[in-house]
Amino acid sequence: MIRRAHIRDIAQLGRIINDCAELGVMLHRSLEDLYEHARDFHVIEDEGQIVGVCGLSIIWADLAEVYALAIVPSHRSKGLGRKLVQAAIEDAQELGLARLMSLTYERAFFKKLGFEVVDRLDLPMKVWSECAGCPKNQACDEIAMIRQLDVPPIHAPKPASPLSTMVELPILIPPAPGSFPSDTPPAPGLALEKAPDNSSDGSSGD
Ligand SMILES: CC(C)(COP(=O)(O)OP(=O)(O)OC[C@H]1O[C@@H](n2cnc3c(N)ncnc32)[C@H](O)[C@@H]1OP(=O)(O)O)[C@@H](O)C(=O)NCCC(=O)NCCS
């Protein structure tokens, strides 16, 4: 049975995801992260056990990502992965998202489901926000694949692309000590008022 994840499923689906992550095919997910994003997930239940999971994350106005797709080894090659991706497609279409992407090693599987390989640099910068915590960060070999959905495109602001953000930022070098003359007057409004000197009037100040 395919259905939306319930909070009570999270620990079990987390184990399925993290078992796959141990094999290097997806990112580890903490329970904290999974509870926060519990509404992203569809699961497949068989005899009371969760045997498959798939998340859908919205990236931008026209793009969502299928992530953490995993079927337990005993239940693979039975069409369950296809069912979960189909559920994500329906979800994305219902939300009005025109494209669905995946970062994956399972090129042949996603090809069968209508996804095409695209240049990773065509994806918005936001896609890579999770990479900071990935051990493969600088040597990522996942393939980016996208499927167009049956949704008319909408007008929306453009996301930052990885290329457009790779600009060199100017480095501000602090002035060397003594490089400003000591008699330079302070900028208007920045002069500190001198505290009244009460030391010679004999009052204790109490
Ligand atoms: C990838 C994965 C989700 C596929 O799930 P599955 O339930 O075994 O796949 P399905 O049975 O739904 O397969 C759908 C189609 O894809 C094909 N397919 C599935 N895996 C394939 C593979 N590795 N290579 C080639 N074709 C594959 C199937 O033969 C089937 O084709 P058909 O419809 O013509 O018969 C599953 O193998 C898995 O959990 N792998 C480990 C985690 C992982 O790598 N997830 C992907 C992260 S993005």
Image (spheres, rainbow, N blue to C red):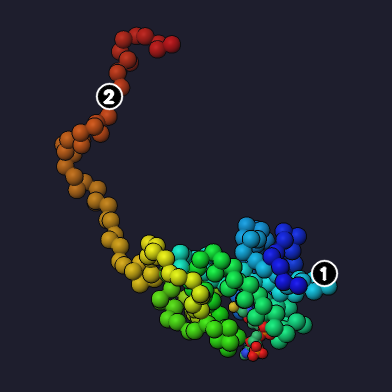
Say which residue appears at 35% left-offset and 72% top-offset. Answer: 163
Q: Residue at x 83, y 73 (%)?
A: 47
Answer yes or no: is residue 21 visible.
no
Q: Which of 79/122 is in front?
A: 79
Q: Residues within 10 Å of mark 1 (few under 14, many from 20)?
A: few
Which x, y percent locates residue 131? 51, 70
Q: Which mark is residue 202?
A: none
Location of the C terminus (image quadrant): top left
* Residue 41 shown left or right of residue 192 in the figure: right
Among the 4 quarters of the image, the one containing residue 190:
top left
Residue at the extreme right: 47
Q: Amino acid at mark 1?
A: Gly
Give amino acid for label 2: Lys
Q: Secondary structure at mark 2?
A: loop
Task: Out of 12 and 60, give the one closest to the viewer.
Answer: 60
Q: Which mark is residue 48?
A: 1
Any mark on residue 194, and which?
2
Instruction: Please name the residue shown 56% across and 66% down the image.
Output: 94
Q: Is residue 142 above or below residue 197?
A: below
- Left-right relation of 169 to 87: left
| Callout 1 secondary element | loop
Q: Is residue 24 above or below residue 39?
A: below
Residue at x 69% of width, y 83% of height: 79
**View quadrant of ligand 1:** bottom right
Where does the image place residue 198, in percent across and percent down from the top left?
Answer: 32, 15
Q: Position of residue 117 (x, y in %)?
A: 48, 84
Viewer-side label of 1, 2: 1
Mark-to-mark CA distance, 1 and 2 = 76 Å
Where residue 86 sits: x, y (%)?
A: 62, 76
146 vs 198: above or below:
below
Residue lying at the far top in this picture: please name it. 202
* Sequence-wise first label, 1 or 2: 1
